[in-house]
Amino acid sequence: MSSTVSAYPFYNYRYVRLLRELASRFRIRIFAASKLPSNFLRAHENFQVIYVFPFVLPRNIRYRIGPYISQIYSMAYQSDIILLFEKVTEPLLLFSRTPIILDMDDPDFKKLARSGAYKVLNSDKIRKIVIPSELAKKRLISLGVAREKLEVIPNGVDLKLFRPQPLPSEEIVLYYGTLTPNRAKLLLESIRIVCRARPTSNFLVIGEVPRPFIETLKSLRLLNRVKLTGFVPHDSLPSYLARARVCIFPQENSLGGRLPMKLLDYMASGRPIVATDVDESWPVKEAGSGIITPPDPSTFAEAILKLLEDEQLSLKLVQNGIKYVRNFSWEKIAAKYAKLIEEVFYG
């Protein structure tokens, strides 16, 4: 089996982890247009990486023409299955005879609809399209993608790494991930409300933080109440989650129903969650592992304060989350993927 990427290592942890799990079942060869410095690359991976260019290409070249370079190069080698984690290029669709499985972890539905790119997904060359949730499946079907092509395989969680820990006495509220505008504004206002209402509370924000976010914290005189760690490798997160009393998912708008990995990590670590009522919060709703609020800062902050005050409620939500997340181990997710690969190969 082969896979192609603009650059390797991936920044997307799902892809790295899936490849590592699948490599114990299949022989995997990855074709990368160029190298990319990253903490995700281990000294000895259990799959082969072939670089078209054994150096780092400029970013604009890497992501514009990288998929074309790697996919054209891969056609010189014979594979039984091509597993793609990025867009399918025209040369691959035109000239490759190898069946394709396309993994769409985070589909841009607006772009697909606007550009008409969804029509490519119905190509006979693409045998299966893997999406992370039933919500995403419904959105693609509504765009015109054939139902029989779609397979739901969600993200997973390392249950050996992320383990339930007792809730700490210190009142720390944790968020990890990107701070896009539809998250940053809600998070900032929630921090302001919670910190003023509860002087013993503090926040821990993990991930790259935009300069305006920091400047706003300074203007609110709350920088001393918010610990900003910057980027933290995914496998180093458990020690940070162990410090949290409450974990949050502040998002203002629905993005189509993907499965944020952070929600599984929160639950596996035994943490109650406050999340907004958006499509991406579906695992919290299914599990009953948190409080769901409208994307309103006052209501969101009120839910955080409630969990900081009500330990019995927090523990009930924690137990719901721990039970639910057992179905999302990477081993189980990889087994579903392996079954799909075999179906495509023998089908």
Image (cartoon, helix red, strand yellow):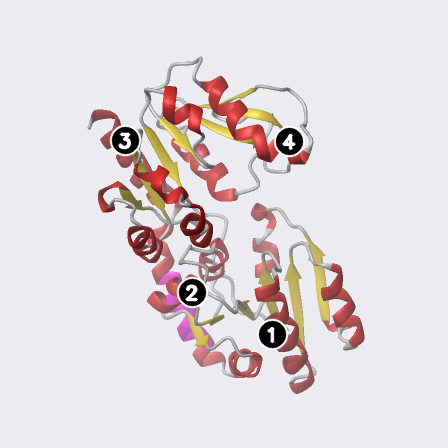
Q: What separation in Å lies between label 1 and label 3 (alpha carbons)?
A: 57 Å
Q: For residue 302, what is the image quadrant?
A: bottom right
Most common SS among magenta residues: helix
SS assignment at label 4: helix
Which quarter of the rendered picture does the N terminus lie within? top left
Kindly identify the amino acid type of the residue bearing the numbered disc 4.
Ile
SS assignment at label 3: loop
| Of residues 167 and 135, the one drawn nearer to the viewer in this rendering | 135
- Report x, y in % for residue 345: 25, 26
| Of residues 87 and 77, the one drawn nearer to the viewer in this rendering | 87
Q: Which mark is residue 169?
A: 1
- Report x, y in % for residue 61: 64, 31
Q: State which mark lies toward you, 1 or 3.
A: 3
The residue that disc 2 covers is: 281
Q: State which mark lies toward you, 3 or 2.
A: 3
Kindly identify the amino acid type of the residue bearing the numbered disc 2.
Ser
Q: Are marks 1 and 3 in contact (CB under 8 Å)?
A: no
Q: Is residue 213 above or below residue 292?
A: above
Q: Are marks 4 and 3 in contact (CB under 8 Å)?
A: no
Q: Are marks 1 and 2 in contact (CB under 8 Å)?
A: no
